Amino acid sequence: MSSPHAPRFQRPAQPLPKLLPCGDPGGLPQRHPRRLSVSSWDPGPACLTMGPLSRENWAQRVATFRASPSAFMVGPEGEDLGRDLLSDLRSEKQSEQTKVSLLSLSLEYPAQLWPDAPAAEAAATSLLDTLVLLPPRPSALRRPLLLAATTALAAGGALGPTSGASRRLLPLLLGLAAGRDLGRGFGPASEQRPLQATACECLRELESCKPGLLGGCLGLLRGLMGQEGPIQPLSLLLSLALRNTLVIKAKARAGLQGLLVAGNSPTEGSPWNWTLAEEGDAHLQPQAPSWSAAEEGECGLAVLEPSPEEARELRAAVAQLLDTSYLLTPAAQAQLLWLLGWAVRGLRGQPPVLFKPQLVRLLGTAQLTLLHAVLALKAAFGEALFTAQDEALLLRRLTLAAQHPALPLPAHLFYLHCLLSFPENWPLGPTGEEAVPLLLGSQLCRGLLPSLLHDPMALLARLHLLCLLCVEDEEKEEKGQDQSLRCYLEELLAGLRQRAALNGGPRALAILCFQASYLVVRCLAGQPMVLTPLTHGLAQLYRAQPALAPHFVDLLDRVGPELGEPLRVALRQEVVSRPGKDEALRWHLQMLAKVANEDAQSATLSFLQAAAAHCLDWGLQQALLQVCRALLRAGVGGGLADLLQVLARQLEDPDGRDHARLYYILLAHLSGPKLGMALGPSLAAPALASSLVAENQGFAAALMVQEAPAPIRLSIGPRRAEGPVPVLQLQVEVLEPVYSLELRFHVERQLYAPVGAVHVPCLCPGRPTSPLLLPLQPRRPAPARLDVRALYTTPTGLTCHAHLPPLPVNFADLFLPFPQPPEGAKVGFFEELWDSCLPEGTESQLWCPLGPHRLEALVSCHLEPFVVVAQAPTSYCIAIRLPPDSRLLLRLEAAHADGVPVALRTDDWAVLPLVGAYLRGLSAAV
């Protein structure tokens, strides 16, 4: 929904042609010299002497402006753009298509072209002058000119009683909306109906920006409803003006004072009534996200006390709008029902039964916007408008519609959301509590149970509904009458955990599993029969996939104690029961830092003592120290002191030894409360009482490794296809001098063997550096992502660490060539490799849409180091070695007119999807 300060429309209703060349600004005829003198816009001598712009100049100018409007406007040509646009609109050398294109630019970028109120006022005046100078023949410019003038006033903040353009535009729009004969200058009779609709849209936009602007014209607008004219624009305009007027009158505690009775409307030159617009100082939203949100910001209508005559006129106006609402589009009907429902709700003398005929018509609608409007009316009026039968019918419709197999995902989610937040007539629980409607039983929702085959969003929405049904059927389950829903829920969660535990599975499956677990905990926190198997299942998931430790940490941060405490115990038991030299030691330490406490001290300390011998790199040592810090804060004593002494002597990294020694000193000299305060986060920086304190704090900061934004940019350079293992060439750039740089790499899911750190003594900005070589040892040929951390020293002597953006390792980065055979044995060598792939391996064929010349370019750019036999440019035999011990062989046969057949063999069937994606990407890139 757009803001009321900005125009809703940005383009004319008809399609806009491509921008054509603009011509000579020429002389401007002066039919209304008095009005033109009001405008502050002056074309100036430069505009009068400059020749017409060519088509190329205009195209370049507009393209530059659209690329960056703000940058263009501060440039040398920005000041003249709006002036040239207004001049070319009056040039007789320009076609109507060109002028419509220029007007579209003013509709899209009014704030840039007319940045302040004086500029917007001048632009609107010039546009109105152009409008009245049009010949009486049919023209495609009248409607875009009305839209452009309205947009300039609304977006530029120039609309007001002191604006001359406003005094001209408002009576003109009202006259066009009323179908008055404004003279031959406003086109033939065939053009009046589209102009009338456009004028109504312009007035509705101005009423949205200035609530109460049309309060004095309600009688006139109501009279137009009974005449021949465009129904939809008039209906929306009248409903918006009526709603704004009622709100303003309710704030002022005043009556309608005959505003609904037709009277004399303002004409051009006569003063406009700005009284209501000045009273409605707050911009009222034409729609709100909910009824309650609308009431919070605006005064209720209960304080408005209309007289019996005014109540009768208001009721007749609402009924008139509702009776013709079936002629509107679904979106317009929904907005009309919202506005009228808000106007009638709480107003004395306006019974909700006025909406009953429309309700009978709309209960069977298939339009989502209308169904949403019906539910909004139900939330507003409840049992005053909807019977129990209506409620049952709505629930059945929503339930059956949500089960339709051909329903698009957004519509399916909409129906599920309506069921989850259905406004009941008499809800039993407290306000705001989630619960399924009373009339929505488990039997009716059998077709809405979630399945592993559903889209993730649909699965979560259905799971939410299932959890609420389990809450509803809790009493039956306790009596042993019905346990099917709970059993189904447990089986579904078990299936999600099983998919998340797959080795090499997509990350989205793990995220979906934890989202579902959190949803179940939030809805069923008071049901131990559900949380107990969920806790055991999550512990088993961690046992199968320790790499999901970050997800477990996030889940523990979000759930309450109902699941948090037993899950902490189960995860701690899983971790300490593992050997300290497990490959997933990094994840075990991260998890233990989250769940460690004073319970099971001996088992935790035994695990840490066994793990200390295997924490050889800086990252593992820091993770081990984080666990010690967590134990210190939990109040663990004696055994931890012995461990810290051992770590202070044995850790290889001096930073780790210093941390262990510091923790031991704190443990030996501080009591429990003071120790917790020393290790806890600082809420505020303490005031420095003396220079000695400042010096000590600076000395401590110099000894600590601090986290800071990295002044380092790391990228992957050209690929090197040589050597026994793949090697990445890393390009390093720094923004400031960096000393003793150490880059540490980690690969997710143990796809590669541990990657060694890279050390650089010194880097300076602007000084060329040789590429850093990073050898990789894949455990299987698959792409991966390298997480990078940097440890470095700044010129001030501080040691800092930072996380760098991850580096992607593509499938092609792993390609290695075979040793080159002798010159005469290349064909036999390739054939021997080709035959050796079967029968253990697999074979496949692909079709690449490449011509003969593109095939040669593809091979020379991407596959040249791996070509064994070449008959350029028609066919190639390519042999690729994939570490650790796989091979990939390609035969690129003679190219056809529409593509190249590719035959491939490999002894590792798991690389087939990767090969297919790689070749398709190459053919699309060449």
Image: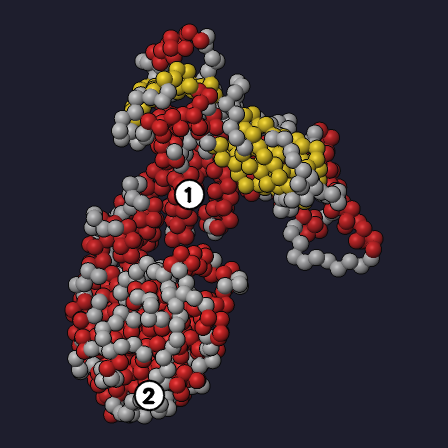
Q: Amino acid at mark 1?
A: Ile
Category of crowding for the residue at label 1, using alpha-carbon neighbours closer than 10 angstroms: few (below 14), some (14–19), many (at least 20): some
Q: Nearer the viewer, mark 1 or mark 2?
A: 2
- Residue 870 makes an appearance in the image: yes
Q: Nearer the viewer, residue 811 or 768?
A: 768
Which image quarter holds the C terminus? Answer: top left
Residue 425 location in percent, x, y?
A: 27, 68
Which type of secondary structure does the marked residue at label 2 adopt?
Answer: loop
Tell me the kind of residue under disc 2.
Answer: Glu
Q: Is residue 606 above or below residue 866?
A: below
Q: Which residue is mark 2?
A: 268
What residue is drawn where x is 40% and y is 60%? 54
Q: Report helix, strand or loop for mark 1.
A: helix
Position of residue 131 measured from the top left corner of the image (x, y, whole percent): 32, 77
Q: How has the structure been colored for display?
A: secondary structure
Q: Residues within 10 Å of mark 2 (few under 14, many from 20)?
A: some
- N-term-proximal mark, 1 vs 2: 2
Disc 1 and disc 2: Cα gap in Å? 64 Å
Horizontal side of residue 460 vs 70, given as left or right: left
Q: Which residue is mark 1?
A: 511
Q: Left or right: 345 with respect to 788? A: left
- Locate the N terminus and report the quarter of the image it occupies: bottom left
Q: Where on the picture, by quarter, is residue 257?
A: bottom left
Q: Is residue 596 in view? A: no
The residue lying toward the viewer, choosing from 720 and 633, is 720
| Residue at image coords 41%, 63% | 53
Left or right placement of residue 357 versus residue 87 in this view: left
In this view, the residue in front, 567 or 345, is: 345
Measured as percent of width and height from the top left, residue 541 is found at 43, 36
Residue 427 x, y percent position in the rendering: 30, 66
